[in-house]
Image: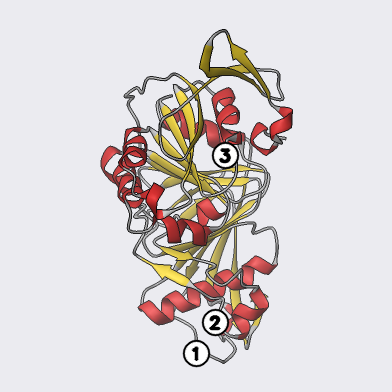
Amino acid sequence: MNIKTLSAGLLSFLLLGCAKEETLVKNNNNNTFAAVGSNTLGSLGRIGSTTDVSRTTSGGTLLMGGGTDVDAAMRWMITKAGGGDIVVLRSTGTDGYNAYLFGLQTCNSVETILIDSRTVANDAGVEAKIRNAEAVFIAGGNQFNYISFWKDTKVEDALNFLRNTKGCVIGGTSAGCMIQGRNYYMAQNGSVLSAAATANPYNVDMTLGRNDFLDNPYLSNLITDTHFNNPDRRGRLIAFMARISKDNGIVPFGVGIDEATAVCIEANGSSKVFGTGTAFFLRQNTTGPETCVSGSRLDWYRSKQAVRCYKINGTANGANTFNFANWTGAGGTSQFYFVDRGTLGVN
């Protein structure tokens, strides 16, 4: 179990002499780290150096499917950050990622910031902390909180600056992954089930956002879904894509990621799949759905070849790859998804 998943009672905090702002933190591997205070609004604490550094970085995107975090993917992120300062963002939860990431691979510092209001999201100090980071990781939680609290704020501006101007990695797991695409599922009214999504693609719980939050390279016409080892997630991702095709008149792409699995995308669009599960890379095969209207069952049949899927199993070393620039992969298998009058099928 990773340190971030442990309860606070399993961490040992020991005061360092008279320096009341600094403590030692011991994780479950019995490694001890310096934890220091932070004046940043919303900060849950910082581990490592109190002095920010400037390191050479290279851009990328980390998409993780939730559940147990993938150590190899996190090391990839820290390496891309040049071992600089890592900032973890969340709207609920604790600082558990601090000791986990700092103990995983050498970096200057890790700090977690709880951004649970638009006041915090528009704070100049929070904005500066993100802009000065070498990588940002967005924890799991509720993606509607992220959209509600962060959209059209200084946090949004800082994240897009970090990724597209400064050239750093942005990563996320579960809800933190689901907001990475320029199309995203908000879960504004609660989480939609596949049966409800395919029975009515305009179900009240089918709340989709488009092109108005993060601008990640290679993810412009793409939507993600996580915890994809749960078969119930698969029909709804096809329904998300059907909506994007119908509502926006574009060819939609999708990425579904199992738990304990991560897709690490390089600046040139090539990627590796790490972990123990599978990543699913989907795109509209020919044309959009035959029937996608409010109150009716989704019908996206197209001779049982509506959506082309390339499945890649994760490995410890990321041996299997996928290229987002030309939508081709190596080391995986192909199949098709289709929806026949509200029922998901695989061909």
Q: In which quarter of the image is the N terminus?
A: top right
Which secondary structure lies at badge 3?
Answer: loop
Quarter of the C terminus within the rendering: bottom right
Residue with the mark numbered 3: 319
The nearer-to-camera label among 3 and 2 is 2
Amino acid type at image mark 3? Ala
User: Which corner quadrant of the image does residue 304 belong to?
Assistant: bottom right
| Above/below status of 256 relative to 32 | below
Which amino acid, mark 1? Val
User: Gap between marks 3 and 2, in whole Å?
Assistant: 36 Å
CB of mark 2 within 8 Å of CB of mark 1? yes
**SS category of the residue bearing label 1:** loop
Q: In this view, does 325 lie to the left or right of 21?
A: left
The quadrant where residue 24 appears: top right
Q: Mark 1 points at which residue?
A: 293
For label 2, count other residues whose C-alpha is less than 10 Å away and answer few (under 14), some (14-19) or many (20+): many
How far apart, in angstroms, are the residues tagged by discs 2 and 1? Answer: 7 Å
Near-viewer residue (290 or 161): 161
- From the image, tell me which residue sits under label 2: 201
What is the x, y in percent for residue 200?
58, 85
Question: In the image shown, does 159 or 163 lie closer to the viewer?
Answer: 159
At 59% from the left and 72% from the top, the residue drawn is 236
Mark 3 or 1, nearer chain start: 1
